[in-house]
Amino acid sequence: MLTSADVKKMAKACGADLCGIASMDRFEGAPKQQDPRYIFPDSRACVVLAFRIPRGYLRGIEEGTYFTAYSAMGYGGLNIIYTPIVLRQLTCFIEDHGYESAPIPNMYPGATISFATQNVIPNRSRPVRSGLPMPDVMIDMRIAAYAAGLGEFGWSKMFLTPEFGPAQRFVALLTDAPLEPDPIFTGKICDRCKLCVKACSGNAISATETESITVAGHKQEWGKLDCTACSVAYRGGKAEYNPFMRPEANEAEYKDNYCGRPKLDEYCGYPKLFEHNAALEGARGCMRECLIHLEEKGILTRKFANKFRHRLPWRLDSKVEDVQNGETLSEIERYGKE
């Protein structure tokens, strides 16, 4: 008999950093277009794998000198290259034990659900049978991670684990193996410091308005997120935090569009990496500021010999032209003292 312990041991041997298991009843009430039970109706468990984003991937962006590692390795490389390999190995391991395993990578190409807004995209596809959702059903990885007992939602809506805080990405697989689920996480990681709100370059996280969801009888709440503002900032849409921004950039031409496309692509000055838009903002508030705070407070179980931030965060002068003419970077305090 294949056990949960067997699956977890193999998941970590293949390269996953964390592994949690959810029973399928925990997805009761999910929107039809995000309900994994439509992907594999006979599934009995959802296995969720977490892959850490090493702190060093963020070092170059923190210093303002090297942006490739996080975009290539911590974003596109994890989602497109590394995690699918591990997911396939675990899928084959489960099927070698006589149980079916349906992998769900963390990719959205061609999906019927908008990654930014989680809304259905009209006319993208149509159901193959009456009563079914449209292909592709895409689960919310953060909700799956919560259902699998791996952690909680932070104020920024980033998913936090006790080990890595906000610094990980998730994939999942569905299986008809009768695996024992993990208990829902009941600890406390996010202390509502709201430094993520202050440090977000896109001002995308509300300090007062909230959104919430109930999973398996447990409520999770976070600050209301402006998905468009988040997406534009993440892509490098704020000149103050993008040293590659073209001098002719006009924020009005892309600020109200998801990821600023296509106009922002002309201005941001950095190529796509592994089919992902370059994450030039480097998750400034929702990941870096949060990670620094959780480490300083001693909340995370994973410890480092040295602190991550050694100087005030950088910000470029407001005019791109000044930077192009050789002006130096200016550093500012991002804790309410601008």
Image (cartoon, helix red, strand yellow):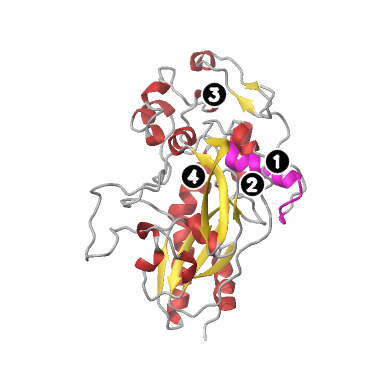
Give residue 131's quadrant in the image. Answer: bottom left
Q: Secondary structure at mark 2?
A: helix
Earlier-in-chain disc, 1 versus 4: 4
- Residue 111 — which label? none
- Residue 240 — which label? 3
- Residue 84, x across and y down, in percent: 44, 60
- Residue 253, x across and y down, in percent: 36, 23
Residue type at mark 2 is Arg
Q: Would you say the residues marked 2 and 1 are in contact, meaning their CB atoms lie under 8 Å apart?
A: yes
Residue type at mark 4 is Ala
Mark 2: few/some/many CA within 10 Å (<14, 14-19, 20+): some
**Image depth: mark 4 or mark 3 in front:** 3
- Residue 92, x across and y down, in percent: 43, 74
Earlier-in-chain disc, 4 versus 3: 4
Q: Look at the image and say whether residue 246 sits in the magenta stretch.
A: no
> In this picture, is 332 found above or below 178?
above
The alpha-carbon separation of the residues under discs 2 and 1 comes to: 8 Å
Q: Would you say the residues marked 2 and 3 are in contact, meaning their CB atoms lie under 8 Å apart?
A: no
Residue holding disc 2: 55
Residue holding disc 1: 308
Residue stretch rendered in magenta on the structure: 285-302
The alpha-carbon separation of the residues under discs 2 and 4 comes to: 14 Å
